[in-house]
Amino acid sequence: MRKKKRQADKWLRAVGENIRHERKIAGLTQEKLAELADLAPRVVQKIEAGQITILISTLRRLRKAIGCRYERLLEE
């Protein structure tokens, strides 16, 4: 069970790093991304840090706001 949790934590960190990377390429601040995705800035901060689980609907809103492909966000 712990191995699965570690794998999930690793995946969440990787997705968060990908979101941060793509956000910066798009020239967006965390605050602007949060506004465009209709999220609280703190939620974007926690997602980028891999601290919270991300819903598919949230991922969709972030992807649309950043303007990138899902694959770019989900790469490990």
Image (spheres, rainbow, N blue to C red):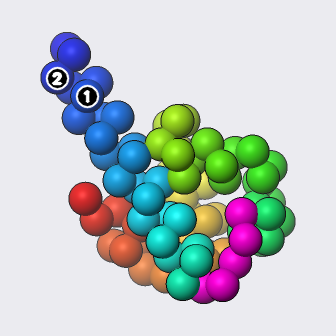
Which amino acid lies under the numbered mark 1 shown in the image of this protein?
Arg
The prevailing secondary structure element of the residues shown in magenta is loop
Mark number displayed over residue 6: 1
The answer to whether marks 2 and 1 mark residues whose Cβ atoms lie closer than 8 Å is yes
Residue receiving disc 2:
3
Relative image position of residue 49 (x, y in whole percent): 52, 46
Which residue is nearer to you in this view: 57 or 47?
47
State which region is magenta: 26-30
Q: What kind of residue is marked 2?
A: Lys
Name the residue at 69% across, 78% down: 28
Q: Secondary structure at mark 1?
A: helix
The N terminus lies in which quarter of the figure?
top left
Q: Quadrant of residue 12?
A: top left
**Residue 12 horizontal side relative to residue 23, left or right:** left
> Left or right: 21 with respect to 58?
left
Q: Residue at x 34, y 34 (%)?
A: 9
Residue 23 in the image, given as x and y percentages of width and height: 58, 74
Vertical position of residue 65 compared to residue 52: above or below: below
* Quadrant in the rendering for residue 34: bottom right
